[in-house]
Image (cartoon, grey):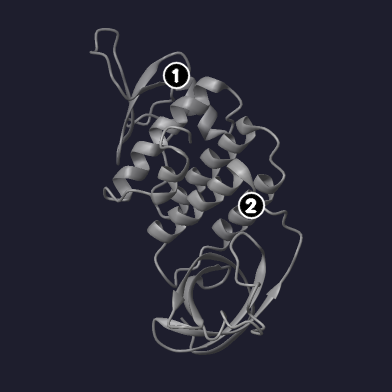
Amino acid sequence: MPRGRIDAQPAYVLHTRPYRETSLLVEAFSRDYGRVALLARGARRPHSTLRGLIMSFQPLELSWSGKGEVLTLMKAEWQGGQPLLVGLPLFCGYYINELLLRLLPREDAHARLFEHYAQMLLRLGYAAKEQGTEADLRSFECALLTELGYGLTLDRDFQGKPVIADARYRYEIERGPVLLTDDAEAESYALSGQSLLDMARDDYSHPVTRNEAKQLIRRLLAHYLDGVELHSRTLFGAGSR
């Protein structure tokens, strides 16, 4: 992390918590510096210029200074253009924010993921159908895993052979799809080759693909989260997304 002052950095607030009587500790996701921890001094005071600006799911430009693990937030400017999230999209927003908090290391820039996150929030803001919301979640989860170096192998099996649309596969973490033979025992995590190919194209229009992708990605995230339970899932039911 560069020391000194950083000005007008595009960013989003992922999480805040009170600090002492009048301040906030802010976890932010910035375009060029990744996830950063910021101290917003006096942000809870009634007349603070930061009050009302430090909120999740809104595009901001943040300026900060200092050194060490926690930097000092100097200025925040709202950039506008993002609808407020309500209902199911709001819970989805909490979910993706928690994924970033749990999985992204601090001070590790991911500019492509930042743009994907910004577009995800816009889609959630204008979401009209649950189907579209769920498809967007799967797309974002895959993008996150790819950015972290955990990209899924979807169109080739673990031996490098093309995935067959009408076959059934078991997805093994760190290996990829394993073809199931006709006499194989029932696999609780089996999914179709067509679902794998749809995921490779980022196409979640088919209900079976959405369901099988959800089960696969949930298992992968549980592995990389090392058993840490996501609080956001408990807010709206672990089985809903």
Q: Earlier in the sequence, mark 2 or mark 1?
A: 2
Is 215 rendered above or below residue 108? above
Picture coordinates of residue 193 (x, y %)?
44, 21
Q: Is residue 39 visible?
A: no
The reply, left or right, for residue 189 in relation to residue 4 is: left
Query: Dot 1: within a 10 Å radius of its alpha carbon, few (fewer than 14), some, or many (20 or more) residues?
Result: some
Residue 164's label in the rendered image is 1
Is 170 rendered above or below residue 54? above
Is 80 rendered above or below residue 40? above
Please tell me which residue is depicted at 47% across the width and 33% down the height of the picture.
Answer: 240
Q: Quadrant of residue 103?
A: bottom left
The reply, left or right, for residue 34 in relation to residue 119 is: left
Please tell me which residue is depicted at 59% across the width and 54% down the height of the picture.
Answer: 117
Q: Quadrant of residue 163?
A: top left
Secondary structure state at the residue bearing disc 1 = loop
Query: Dot 2: within a 10 Å radius of its alpha carbon, few (fewer than 14), some, or many (20 or more) residues?
Result: many
Picture coordinates of residue 222 (x, y %)?
32, 43
Type of amino acid at the residue the image marks with label 2 = Leu
* Label 2 to label 1: alpha-carbon separation: 34 Å
Picture coordinates of residue 228 (x, y %)?
30, 51
Q: Residue under circle 2?
A: 121
The reply, left or right, for residue 193 in relation to residue 189 is: right
Nearest to the observer: residue 48 or residue 65: 48
